Image (cartoon, helix red, strand yellow):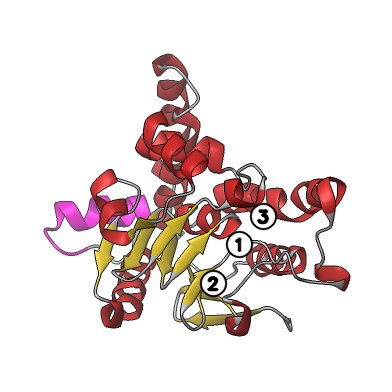
Amino acid sequence: MDFETIRVETLGNVRKITLNRPERLNACPPNMAVEIADALADLEGARAVLLTGEGRAFCSGADLAASGKRSITGGAGSYKALTEAYNPLMIKLSRLSVPLVSAVNGVAAGVGCSLALSGDFVLAARSAYFLQAFVNIGLVPDGGASWVLPRLIGKPRAMQMMMLGERIGAEQALEWGMIYKCVDDEALAAEAMALAERLAAGPTVALGIMRQNLARALDSDLSAALVTEAEGQKIAGDSADSREGIEAFLGKRKAEFQGK
């Protein structure tokens, strides 16, 4: 499949998606969100996804200067773009059956911040920063930011980002628990790929269930979480990877998972 705004590569068992509008700091018009979702529709052969940006930015947010099919005009235009493009993408990312790694190589602003934080593991270059810039243009956070940020960093810090529109650098984001790791700029690509490859070599069925169970547990009580875990364990326990893992444990050897 050919894409206009992203580049998609299959590197071993890793599906790498690169936001590819460097001249616009990878600003994300609605059609980019649709293309990312399309790239995730068929993950045959992929056991992990790596999401990053081309050039010196991860994603500078929605492209407010775009025209034509990329345009977002006024409140009605924003509502249409969210409900038809951005929101479906965020739901798809949350429901992936494989692990998702985000490599944040520069600014992650607006909906780009939400995209970055959708990763199970978010690695950021030291020069990168996260920004909820909506207040600066009289808009409200979207892309799921009002849901994910309080859960990651608590309400006071989420309010700071949203209402004051302050930049949060990679090191501060790590200190807050917003991201998994902060690395030197020149090491980001290699470290993110190494992590994605490590996850891709793991028990994919179990890893997919883990990420979905964690998401559900955020909105459920203990009893519901226990039921969800039992149901997930039943599926994972019937997987070939589980059998391999147990046999390897008993045989005192390293397991070789196949993602089945």
Read off the residue under disc 3.
89
What residue is shown at x 47% (from left), y 43% (from top)?
164
Mark 1 or mark 3, which has the lower sequence index?
1
Distance Cα–Cα, label 1 vs label 3: 14 Å
Q: Please determine whether, in this image, residue 71 is positioned above or below residue 211.
A: below
- Which element is circle 1 on? loop
Q: Residue tagged by mark 2?
A: 45
Whether 250 is among the magenta residues is yes
**Count of numbered badges drawn on the protein:** 3
What's drawn in magenta, residue-wise?
A: 241-254
Number of other residues with Cα within 10 Å of mark 2, as a class: few under 14, some 14 to 19, many 20 or more: few
Mark 1 — residue?
61
Q: Which amino acid type is marked by label 1?
A: Gly
Q: Earlier in the sequence, mark 2 or mark 1?
A: 2
Assess whether mark 3 and mark 1 are in contact (beta carbons under 8 angstroms). Answer: no
Instruction: Indicate left or right for 241 with 73 as reference.
Output: left
Query: What amino acid is found at the position of numbered circle 3 in the picture?
Result: Leu
Q: Earlier in the sequence, mark 3 or mark 2?
A: 2
The local secondary structure at tag 2 comes to loop
Q: Nearer the viewer, residue 82 or 216?
A: 82
User: In the picture provided, is 32 more to the left or to the right than 194?
Assistant: right
Residue found 47% across the figure and 55% down from its top: 131
